Image (cartoon, rainbow, N blue to C red):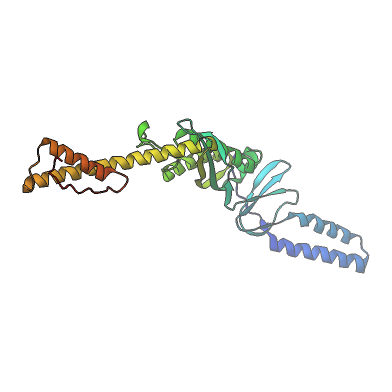
Amino acid sequence: MSQEKLLKPSNGYFMLFVFLILFFGSIAGIILTKNSWWIAAFVIAIFILPGFILVNPNESRVLLLFGDYKGTVKQNGLFWVNPLFSKNKISLRARNFDSERLKVNDKLGNPVMISTILVWRVQDTYKASFDVDIFENFVVVQTDAAVRKLASMYPYDNFADEGLEEEITLRSSVNEVSDALEKELEERLDIAGIEVLEARIGYLAYANEIASAMLKRQQATAIVAARHKIVEGAVSMVEMALNELSKKEIVDLDGESRAAMVSNLMVVLCGDKDASPIVNAGTLNH
């Protein structure tokens, strides 16, 4: 036997009626008739009692007879099985697992702190019971291993100086990273009969030893990108201004005057502080 087998046990209510008849009938018979045969009925009633099982919604019972797997009961209700069966209870409910924060290296070798939130449930009770030792511990260990592998596959973030603008990153590509994590966990947990319902990154940050430096790098990258946009806009505005002045013949500027005007406009447009105007009472050159 290498796979789960569903077992349909006997009706528990009928056997409960038989048990009550035998149990109370034997007690009454022993007291009233003093006949030793009623003791046999009492023993049979006691033998019947361990065979009752109650299966609640999203629960199961794995049945074994002296180490031999007989089947799994997933149907809800009161049932009766062979009293010699061992009945292992396995929950089929969805469970949450929030892993510990692990320090791992991303694709670029930067140490990051990462954890995952996993939603899982038992799908195959045979695999969960017999193919692994303790399936709950198996889920914990394999989740940590999957997270470590995932973190090494992608960089934490991309930077323009490294040419990673098109790559998937742990910080920005949430859906892609989650899909990759779910696929990795499904492959690892299938041996234990575990179904992965959802897997998401729960915590992600640079490790403390580089967090300050990486924050400054991110800020510098943002400043450079902002300055680049400002310069692009300023050049466009200066070009438009010169073209409009020339087109409408408002003022005739020679090369030196144009250079001075361009310089002044670039300072005004690209400066991080408001410019202070100066009124020139002389000519354009003085």
In the image shown, does 239 or 217 lie closer to the viewer?
A: 239
Is residue 146 visible from the viewing direction of this image? no
In the image shown, does 104 or 23 lie closer to the viewer?
A: 104
Could you tell whether 54 is left or right of 117 in the image? right
State the image coordinates of residue 228 (x, y, percent, origin top left): 29, 39
Tell me the quarter of the image containing the N terminus.
Answer: top right
In the image shown, does 160 or 45 lie closer to the viewer?
A: 160
Query: Outermost residue, right direction?
Result: 34
In the image shown, does 229 or 234 lie closer to the viewer?
A: 234
Picture mark count: 0
Could you tell whether 28 is left or right of 14 in the image? right
Residue beneath the point at 93% across and 65% down: 34
State the image coordinates of residue 216 (x, y, percent, origin top left): 44, 38
Residue beneath the point at 20% across and 49% down: 279
Could you tell whether 11 is left or right of 116 in the image? right
Is residue 225 visible from the viewing direction of this image? yes
State the image coordinates of residue 142 (x, y, percent, origin top left): 57, 38
State the image coordinates of residue 162 (x, y, percent, origin top left): 37, 31
276 versus 16 height, above or below = above
**Res 66 quadrant in image:** top right
**Res 193 quadrant in image:** top right
Residue beneath the point at 78% across and 65% down: 20
Tell me the quarter of the image containing the C terminus.
Answer: top left
Query: Outermost residue, bottom direction?
Result: 32
